[in-house]
Every structure is written in structure tokens, then in C-alpha cells.
Image (cartoon, rainbow, N blue to C red):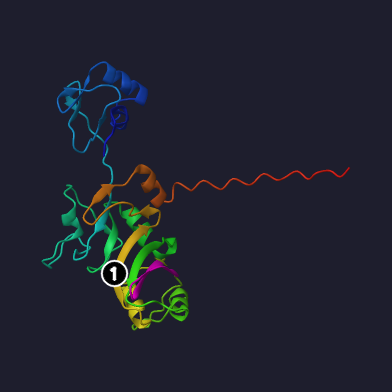
Amino acid sequence: MEERLQKILARAGLGSRRACEQIIIAGRVRVDGKVAVLGQKADPAADRITVDGKPISLPREHIYIALYKPRGVISAVTSPDTRPTVRDMIPVPGRFYPVGRLDVDSEGLILMTDDGDLANRLTHPRYGHEKVYKVLVARHPDEKQLAAWRRGIVLEDGYRTAPAVVHVESKAGKGAWMRVVLREGRKRQIREMGRLLGLPVVKIIRVQIGDLHLGKLKPREWRYLTPDEVQRLKGKKDRKPARPKPRRKKKSRP
């Protein structure tokens, strides 16, 4: 991910950003062999950055990648299956893995990272991170089916699902697109719930994990997370509280 050179140099321990600006102005910095200029951006993962002819050394950083997993791709790093894995979708060196799996027939947002602490935070039930899905079912659900999905049902293995937020977004021929918000993630849970409720699931697209959104990514596309997105996932950056409305002054009676 590209960022301003003075920021990269500061992370490499070459001084404050202002001091690093002076190093750039002095012509001591080169990017891929060319003298850098103030205001220039670079990608430390892809570009060779040198100061006085010596390559800079950055402290190791974790990898955070959002991927749109297509159908037919396995949510794993390696698999004995001949089908491709999510790791095959990202031509980036390093060891990182998927957080929050999707079954092979489902698609949508997958987070890839090597940050074990964040992976635990996103998958441990006590943190209650919401996962949002767009679900296409083969029939129009009635109010009784929606109510059962919302309060939770008992699956065939005896597990009772937690309450969920479910509503119909639009009709699609004989079926309907639903928005399903879960705080748990059992294997093929949405498909099994739909089957037991008489709503066969045709398609599942995960569009959100916690504060991370799929956005405009298309199948097989991926991008690095922004620092702001990472901080939000870690719970270190809260949303701005709503400003209280100013009270109206009561008019005094004459």
C-alpha cells in the first residue's frame, strides 16, 4: 500500500516526519534508483527505498487483506481438494490465513491476516462481532418463518441457534433476497436453518464482518485494509458519539 515517503522513513526510525522531509529535500532518498521528491508516495512492500545508498529496514507489520471469495473456492490456505483456495487468490508472499470461513458454495467477504490476536477477537463468541449476509431463498418467507429465524431454532444436532436479525430486502421471482445478521458462525448454519424452515437457500453472499464491509469488491478481487479499518476491528477506535441536541429555551410568559 502506497504512503508518503516521510511517513515510511519515520517508521524506519530515521527521525520525525519533519526531519525525514529534510532528508528527502536533501536528495538523499531514492525509490527504485530514482531520486525521490517531497510529497512522493511509495509502497515499502514493492519498492526499493534507500537512504544514502542503503536500503531502509521497516519493523515487521501484520498483513490485513479483504477478499471477495467466489463460489467454488475453499476457505483454507491448503487443501487436498483440487479446487482453488482463498490463498491462491492473493499473489502476496508471506504466511496468512482466512478468518471467518465460508463454505465452498457461498461467496463474499473473507478477511486474510497473520494477526492471531485479531483472528481470535473476530471469531470468539464473547466479542459478539456481527456478520451480515445477503441470502437468496427459493420461496417468499411468511411472518411465521421469519419469526422462527429471528428467535432461533433447534438444528438437527440439537444446537439451538442464537437470535438473529432477519428481514426481507426484495422479491426475486418466486424467491426473495433476505438480509441476515448473525453473532455466531456454525458450519453451514444459514443453509440448514433455511432448509428446516422450508426456505431452501439458493445463494449466500457475506457483505460485512464487524466494521469491515465488502464494499465494491467483485469476485476474486482483494485489497489491503486501511489503518482505520484495522483499528476499528481491534476495537481501538470508537465511533463518534452523537452530539446532543441543543435544548430549546422556554419563552417566558409576559
Secondary structure character of the magenta stretch overall: strand
**Residue 91 appears in view:** yes
In this rendering, the answer to whether 58 lies above or below 50 is below
**Residue 16 appears in view:** no
Q: In the image, which residues are magenta?
A: 165-180
Quadrant the C terminus occupies:
top right
| Residue occupying the point 32% across, 62% down | 206
- Which of the two residues, 176 or 226, is positioned nearer the viewer here? 176
Q: Position of residue 122 (x, y in %)?
A: 37, 58
- Residue annotated with mark 1: 203
Would you identify the image quadrant in which residue 4 lies? Answer: top left
Q: Is residue 87 left or right of residue 143?
A: left
Would you identify the image quadrant in which residue 192 lies? Answer: bottom left
Asked if residue 177 is among those painted magenta in the image, a careful observer would answer yes
Asked if residue 176 is among those painted magenta in the image, a careful observer would answer yes
Q: Is residue 33 left or right of residue 217?
A: left
- Which of the two residues, 143 or 174, is positioned nearer the viewer here? 174
Q: Mark 1: which amino acid?
A: Lys
Q: Position of residue 155 (x, y in %)?
A: 36, 81
Q: Is residue 24 left or right of residue 208?
A: left
